[in-house]
Amino acid sequence: MILPVLSALAEPTRLAAMHMLRDGNEHCVCELMQALGATQSRMSRHMQVLRQAGLVLDRRDAQWVRYRRNPGLPPQIAAVLDAVLDTMRDAGPAAAPGGERSAA
């Protein structure tokens, strides 16, 4: 069960989407698209990977789909996810897609 989760989180856009969903609230795919600079089709594909990994739940709301973090994650998976998201938060803007990275 951990391999699909780690694979899903290994992509920067999906990781950033999970960071946005960390609050536990529902977020429209339109919000995710705008914040992450992704097209609707690209964002939907990313969210499908997260859904298949069991990390998010979705709900159709008229023309849009709303996503939220899966509150029923097994404790071990939730701990891994939180640790990854904490690392992203602690790394600052450089960890986010499009964030500034220093030239080393």
Image (tube, grey):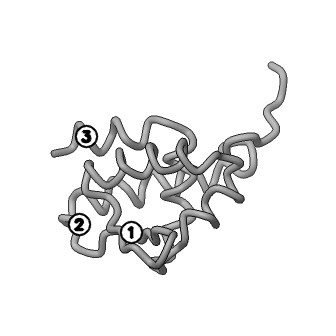
Residue occupied by mark 2: 73
Residue occupied by mark 3: 4
Mark 2 falls on what kind of element? loop
Residue 100 image point, x, y percent: 82, 38
Spatial distance from mark 1 to mark 3, Cα to Cα? Answer: 16 Å
Q: What residue is rendered at 36% in x and 49% in y? A: 48
Spatial distance from mark 1 to mark 2, Cα to Cα? Answer: 9 Å
Residue 9 image point, x, y percent: 42, 43
Q: What residue is rendered at 36% in x and 74% in y? A: 59
Q: Dividing the image into 4 quarters, which one contains the N terminus?
A: top left
Q: Closer to us: mark 1 or mark 2?
A: 1
Q: What residue is rendered at 56% in x and 39% in y? A: 12
Q: What residue is rendered at 29% in x and 45% in y? A: 5
Q: In this view, does 16 lie above or below 7?
A: below
Q: What residue type is labelled 3?
A: Pro
Disc sitting over residue 69 in the figure: 1
Q: Which of 69 and 39 is in front in this view?
A: 39
- Which of the marked residues, 2 or 3, is nearer the chain's N terminus? 3
Mark 1 falls on what kind of element? strand
Q: Which of 87 and 15 is in front in this view?
A: 15
Q: Is residue 16 above or below residue 22?
A: above
Residue 24 image point, x, y percent: 44, 77
